[in-house]
Amino acid sequence: MKDNNGIGIIGTGHYLPSKIQSNEELCAIIPDLTTEWILEKTGIKRRFHLADGETASSIAIQASLNAIENSKITNLNDINLVIVASFSQEYLFPLCLPKFILNWGFQKIVRSLT
C-alpha cells in the first residue's frame, strides 16, 4: 500500500450472528404476541442472537475479515486505524478491541476508536 498523508476508508465489513429467531418463534414463547403485530409495530421480521461460542469480539473479527477482503489489503501492517463499534460487549473492561488486535497479530501499535 502506498504511504501517504491522506485518510480514507478502503474497506468495510459486517457480520451477523448465525442464530436467527423469527417472529413465529418469538410468538411461540410469548403467546400474546402475533407476527403481524410485531411487524406492524416494529418492522422486525427476524432477530439475530449469538450462538454458542460466538462473542462480540468473534463477530468483530469476522466482520474485519470481510473488510480486509473488500479492501484488497495484503499486509495487515498497512492498517493504521481500527474502528470497532459495538452496542454490547463481552465485558465492561477490557473492550473487545484488544482481543481483535491480538487475533490479527498487528506488529505495530494501531490507533483505535471504540
Image (cartoon, rainbow, N blue to C red):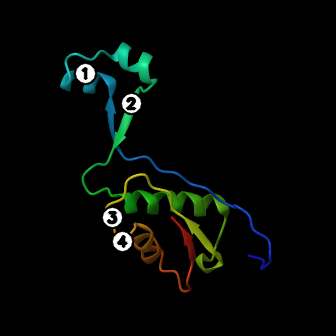
Q: Is 13 rendered above or below residue 42?
A: below
At which x and y percent is residue 8?
74, 64
Dot 1: few (<14), some (14–19), or many (≥20) neighbours within 10 Å? some
Q: Secondary structure at mark 3?
A: loop
Q: Quick one: SS at disc 2?
A: strand
Q: Check contact, mark 2 vs mark 1: CB within 8 A.
A: no
The residue under label 4 is: 94
Image quarter for residue 77? bottom right
Q: Closer to the N terminus: mark 4 or mark 1?
A: 1
Q: Nearer the viewer, residue 77 or 92?
A: 92
Up-down relation of residue 107 to residue 100 (above or below): below
Which residue lies under the disc numbered 1?
Answer: 27
84 or 46, which is in the foreground?
84
Q: Amino acid at mark 4?
A: Pro
**Tag in front: 4 or 1:** 4
Categorize mark 3 by other alpha carbons within 10 Å: few (<14), some (14-19), many (20+).
few
